[in-house]
Image (spheres, rainbow, N blue to C red):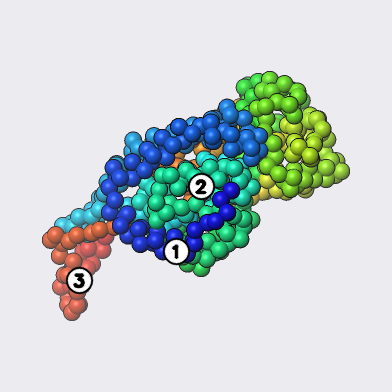
Amino acid sequence: MPSNNPDFNSVFEKQKAKSLELRSSKASERISKIKAIKSWVEKNQSGIAEALYKDFRKSETEVKISEIMPVISEARFIIKNLKAWMAPKSVSVPLLFLGTSNKLLAQPKGNALIISPWNYPLLLALKPLMAAISAGCTAIIKPSELTPNTSDLLHRMIEELFPEDEVCVFTGGAEMAIALQKLPFNHVFFTGSPTVGKLVMKAASEHLASVTLELGGKSPCVVDSGVNLKAAAKKIAFGKFLNAGQTCIAPDYILVKEDLKEPFIQTLKEAFENLSGTDYRNNSDFCRIINEKHFERIDDLIDKSVQEGASIVYGSKREQSDCFIPPTILTDINLNMPLMEEEIFGPVLPVLTYENFDEAINLINQGEKPLAIYMFGGSSATKKALEQKTSSGPIVHNDFGIQFIYHGVPFGGINNSGIGVSGGYEGFLEFSHLKPVIKNHFNPSSIFYPPYTPKVKKLLNFAMKYLA
């Protein structure tokens, strides 16, 4: 990990000055920077995989699936569409303002701060960075101190590709993040927990900076009548196997119809074993919990819930010395148990049941608004009810996780699970300010100026009745 960060106050001022120049940068200039990121990632895949393995034993294939491929895909989408995104847009002219014209200019907000997390440390730093660059912003990135090898790699990458007055990485712990947030950035993009997100939003409010908060929460997975159990179990198992469940959009708990509970659990056990066998600890494709602190937190959630009556129906021994927690399924769960009071962020699945679909809706609505809702099976009526009667980030039917890399669809939560969106055009807009430009060619707006004669009043009444 680099130990001698440049002076962040100096870099901030340099970026502030540079941001004025970048306001008028061309699409071709921004695209060349996106291409440089894409090329670097493509050429350094082995180094990226090595860094992530050192940080939490993430396999090379999983790194390609969940870190490298999404970056390359997002880069290609931006490269293909940026020129159209940057082009001035116009809206229809209201009758009252015939004789005028308008356009909307997408201007860069300016200086951006990106605070990225440890769970997908490359992807969740580079995806918002590419959005910031596409919008014409400068950026300072503060990566997580919990993945030092990937942060070191990110630091080297940015130094190779960009002058510090455009993009710069500052490493360090929470104290660095706190210090950076005292600077008057124009936009702050944070990925992490709701608890820290509130602190980020509070700090940003001191400067009236806009924020994008990609948070998390307890994303439910509903298993309803008509489900293909084998297909559903495979998707759900992968959602908890990937990154050992340390994913903000992982299914956090299962809501399964009562008469499907036993066959579903049996099929889910088989699905986990089809992914990796039964010896998870020696399986090179199954990564570790990021550190002992997070291991202890998840371990404690399981133990306390068991003490309160939960039953472990699947899961082998947990090993603190190795930060190893195997895929674990628990039943006999109620909403007051520790496992249901916070986001698990690990390979652990509590299973709850419901008799009728309204009960499932009510269970979801009792908690904070989730970042995602997954549903397998169900009728057109129950699917419609889920979509209309819940409030959440994306709803995904019959799959897991595809919403994050589904081009053209904004990704983001609501309230406790997030503020703002990311990805594609919407990601570009998060770092942009839409500036209206209106020109009056021959509209007689001055006919309503004082003195307010009877004629003016008559014209005003006509305008209110027919034109407004």
The residue drawn where x is 54% and y is 56% is: 4
Mark 2 crowdedness (10 Å alpha carbons): few <14, some 14-19, many ≥20: many
What's the amino acid at mark 2? Answer: His
Give the residue type at disc 1: Ser
| Residue name at image x 41 percent, y 44 percent | 161
Residue 155 got which mark? 2
Sequence-wise, the earlier of marks 1 and 2 is: 1
Q: Earlier in the sequence, mark 1 or mark 3?
A: 1
**Does 191 sit left or right of 127 as displayed?**
right
Q: Residue at x 71, y 44 (%)?
A: 291
Mark pair 3, 2: CA separation: 60 Å
The quarter of the image holding the C terminus is bottom left
Label 1: which secondary element: helix
Residue at label 1? 10
Locate residue 232, reporting x and y percent: 63, 25
Q: Position of residue 35 (x, y in %)?
A: 37, 38
Disc number at residue 448? Answer: 3
Q: Secondary structure at mark 2?
A: helix
For this orientation, the residue located farthest to the bottom is 451
Do the residues under discs 3 and 2 have CB atoms within 8 angstroms? no
Give the residue at the far left of this rendering: 442
Residue 239 can be seen, yes or no: no
Query: Residue type at mark 3?
Result: Phe
Whole-number angstrom distance, CA of label 1 to CA of label 2: 18 Å
